[in-house]
Amino acid sequence: MDPTQHADRVPADQTPPDGEPPVAPTGATDTAAGSGPSTGPAGTGPAAEVGAAEPALVETTAGAGAGDPALVEPAPDAAPVDVDVPPARPTAGGRPARREKARSERSPKDMALSLLVLLVPIALLLAFYRGFLGGEQPTVIDAAPAYEQARSANAFPVSEPARLSSGWRTVSASYRTVEGGANLRVGYLTPEGRGVQLVQSNVPPEKLLPAELTAEGQPQGPTDLGGRSWQQYTGRGNDQALVLLEPNRTILVVGDAGDNELRQLAGSLR
């Protein structure tokens, strides 16, 4: 060795002696093996950069090979996944959820009390309407103008009830000319709350009776009231009728009242 040559320097001539294999330079061997000289802490420097780019050696399973390591590409750094978590939504009106829960879990007693609070004012209004304003009470009218109009027309004799009890209330009255004659119609509400109509007309009976009693009206036999012979008839639905046939007029007392009330009205005509 040349005395002037530094001890750490690699001889330029790398030719091995006769019979020996060639020897690679130390720096090339280290570089090829990924373990070259480092200039800083572990994991930095040229060797670390070279090693980071090379695939890692991973032992394969028994079936993959006879103990040969497999080359596996390193996985790229996983990017962080941002998960947006929505903030808690307040309940309607900004009220706490526990108050909403408490409202939905009201007991039947609370519901009954709430319903009672609503029903009490309604009951008071209904009582005031019926007791002081006369709600659901029929409107009582004066039938005198209709009787006077029929008498003035002089189309037929006009009879009017007399000595009826105070429980009878007049609710309608009209006089009208119709095809074939004229009709005087007065509606009453009986003491038992039933409806009865008193019809006096000069329309021929063969037209008047089917119109008032329908085609199903059938005679049920005579009955005597106030010295005159009346005929009992069936009417529409539950209606009954008393019919007085005279030469120039026909009188009908028809309604869903009882037989005694029908007879009372018919017997009071004067």
Image (tube, helix red, strand yellow):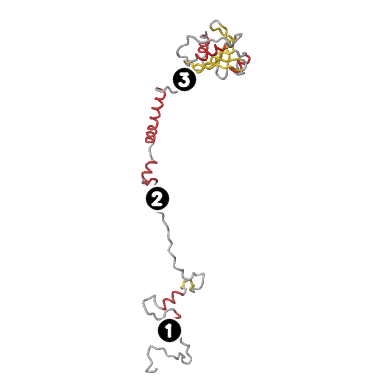
Q: Amino acid at mark 1?
A: Gly
Q: Where 188 sits versus 45, above or below?
A: above
Task: Give the Cα separation between the discs numbered 2 and 3.
Answer: 62 Å
Q: Give x and y (percent) for residue 147.
A: 52, 13
Task: Identify the residue position indicated by label 1 in the image.
Answer: 27
Task: Give the Cα separation between the discs numbered 2 and 1.
Answer: 66 Å
| Of the image marks 2 and 1, the number of the one nearer the N terminus | 1
Q: Amino acid at mark 2?
A: Arg
Left/right of residue 78 with respect to residue 186 in the rendered view:
left
Q: Amino acid at mark 3?
A: Thr
- Judged from the image, the secondary structure of the residue bearing numbered disc 2 is loop
- Judged from the image, the secondary structure of the residue bearing numbered disc 3 is loop
Left/right of residue 178 with respect to residue 112 in the rendered view:
right
Question: Which residue appears at 49% of the width and 9% of the height?
Answer: 162
Task: Give the Cα separation between the discs numbered 1 and 3.
Answer: 126 Å
Task: Identify the residue position indicated by label 3 in the image.
Answer: 139
Q: Where 18 sits versus 200, above or below?
A: below
